[in-house]
Amino acid sequence: MLPVMNQADLSEDPANATVGTAPEAKPLTVSYATGWPIDIIYGYLHKNYEEKGFNDAMMKNDLAFRDMNMGIIRNKILMIFREINLNYDVMKKDIETRMDTCNAAGLLTTLSELDKQMSIIITHKSELAQLEEDFRNNANEASVPLQSYDCGFLRGIATIAMSTTQKATQMSQPAVAPIFQQKVSA
C-alpha cells in the first residue's frame, strides 16, 4: 500500500490531510501524474496555501500565529518526505528479493521488468533527496507552500489594516445632510 493523498485531500489543508488510508480505512491510490509515491510530495509542494494564510490572518493577525502555522505546514511536508522515502525503501527491498528469486529461476524477462522498476525507484529517491534539500533550504519551487502561505497571511493583515483605516476615516468625517428634501403628499 502506497502512502498517498487523493484529490479531495489536496483541495483541503494538506497539514490535516490523511496519508495512507481514507477515513473508511480503504487504501487510496495515486490517481494523477506518474502513479508513483513521488506524486504525493509534488502535490504538497504545488499546493497553494495563500487562501489558508489569508483566512488565518483574518482569524488572528499575529505574526507568532503565522510562524506557528508555517512551522506546522513545514513539519507536515517533512513528515511526508520521510513517509515516501520509507515507502520507496520498502519497494526497493521487495524488488531486490523478487530479482534474486527471478535470477535463480532464470526468468530473464521478469528480471528485466524488475530492473526497470528498480531504476525508477533509484531515480525517484534521488529526486526526493534534491526536493527535500531544496525545501529545507527554502530554494526553488520547493518553498512555494510556505511562500504562498506567507503571502496570503500578509494579504490578510493588509486587508484588516485597510478596513480599519477606512472605518477610522468614515468615523472622523461629519455626516452631510441632504441639500434637497422632498415632501411627498398623498
Image: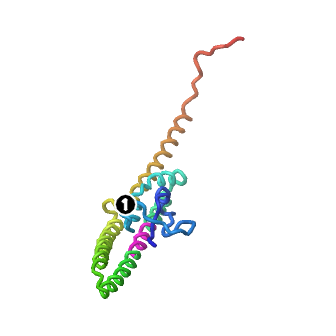
Relative height, residue 135 to residue 100 (above, below): above
Which residue is under mark 1? 33
Residue 139 percent location from the top left of the image: 31, 62
Residue closest to the far bottom: 104
Q: Front-most of 52 and 176?
A: 52
Residue 16 percent location from the top left of the image: 51, 63
Q: Front-most of 37 and 148?
A: 37
- SS assignment at label 1: loop
Residue 101 percent location from the top left of the image: 34, 86
Query: Image check: 98 left or right of 71?
Result: left
Q: Which of the 4 image quarters holds residue 132?
A: bottom left
Residue 92 percent location from the top left of the image: 35, 78
Relative height, residue 89 to residue 3 (above, below): below
State which quarter of the image contains the C terminus: top right
Q: Which of the 4 image quarters holds residue 184?
A: top right
What range of the chain is rendered magenta? Answer: 76-85
Q: Is residue 84 magenta?
A: yes
Q: Front-most of 116 and 79?
A: 116
| Scheme by which the image is coloured | rainbow
Amino acid at dot 1: Ala
Residue closest to the far top: 186
- Count neighbours of disc 1 (C-alpha within 10 A) and say few if under 14, some if 14 to 19, many if 20 or more: few
Please tell me which residue is depicted at 43% across the width and 64% down the height of the picture: 30
Q: Which of the 4 image quarters holds residue 138?
A: bottom left
